[in-house]
Image (tube, rainbow, N blue to C red):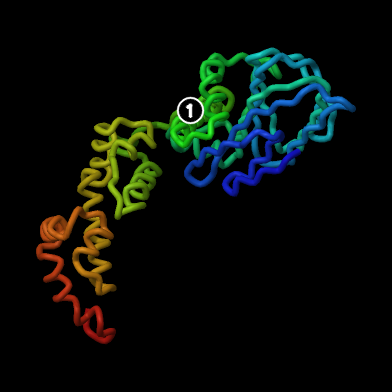
Amino acid sequence: MAERDTRMDCSRLPGPAPVRVTPLQDSAFSATRFRIGRPRTGPHVVRMEAADAYVVLYQLCSHPVHDIRIDGRVVRSQPSTHGSLHVIDQAGDPCAWLEHPADTLMVHLPRPAVDALAREAGATWDGVLRAPVAWNTRDPVVSGLEPLLLDTLASTAPAHDLLHDQLMRTLGIHLVQAYGGLRQRRAVFRGGLAPWQERQAKERLSARLDQPVLIADVARAFGLSPDHFSRAFRVSTGMAPQAWLQRRRVEQAMHLLRSTASPLAGVATACGFSDQSHLSRVFARVVGCTPGAWRRAIAPRAHDPGAPR
């Protein structure tokens, strides 16, 4: 079995076809097309090293029964046809002996990736992925996505990368929902955000202060509309998201003004303001004076450890 270390999810999928990786918050999941012809001497042995992960097998052609070992026990699979689906728990150190041609779409889902997909959907999952009908679960969603997924897997064109990532995220959320009991968390708490939502919203808003932030993107991470998210955020924090973000940028500007000699234009850029004038207007509205005046006022204390504070 060929080893393919993606450095993000360490997925190990068999076969010579390329493994396409879809990054998530702190993990990744991947897909490949696994194809073999009829073995000439003995069965083709396919082993997936034990890992805290699941592999979804979607058959692209009919496949007869074969032996498979999971958790040290050898069992016979069921015959499967094109469009049938099965989920294998990779923790069982699975190994299969294939005596017939195979053509399978394989999706590798490490547990951290499933957790990340659930978080992006603002949901929880059961902790186990399982196909309701072993080897023969029919899934019209995956069948509908099949042609597009195979096209993007086969293509090396950079233009297909974004399409592939979007398709894979859609597929990942569907697989967790259909086979992992994905269910929405309560969207709001007493009219505002739940504590975990407020904490994560603030982290997302302040993660890259030097970059533009779209409130719609933050809201989407919690499964909320921008208007709903903004209202709930205001109830929880007393401020609209944009106002809270501007205050965080001013706080960061104050830190840079106090601790560095960067020019005001550089401070503005580092904190996500469009230019020095924009920084000055917002800073004056929040602090009550311009950044230049504030820096001059705190300069003695910033450079003299013994000065009163």
Residue nearest the viewer, comparing 35 with 84: 35
Picture residue at 27% right of the left edge, 67% below the top: 255
Tell how many labels: 1
Assign a secondary structure to mark 1. helix
Rate crowding at label 1 as few (under 14), some (14 to 19) or many (20 or more) other CA atoms within 10 Å: some
Q: Quadrant of the N terminus?
A: top right
Residue nearest the viewer, comparing 235 with 3: 3
Residue 206, compared with residue 35, is above or below; it is: below
Q: Position of residue 169 (x, y in %)?
A: 48, 31
Horizontal relation, residue 240 to residue 63: left or right: left
Q: Quadrant of the C terminus?
A: bottom left
The residue labelled by disc 1 is 167
Residue 57 sits in quarter: top right
Residue 212, compared with residue 193, is above or below; it is: below
* Residue furthest front in the image: 157
Q: Position of residue 96 (x, y in %)?
A: 80, 29
Q: Position of residue 280 (x, y in %)?
A: 13, 60
Picture residue at 21% right of the left edge, 54% below the top: 273
Picture residue at 49% right of the left edge, 41% below the top: 24
Q: Position of residue 242 (x, y in %)?
A: 22, 45
Q: Amino acid at mark 1?
A: Leu
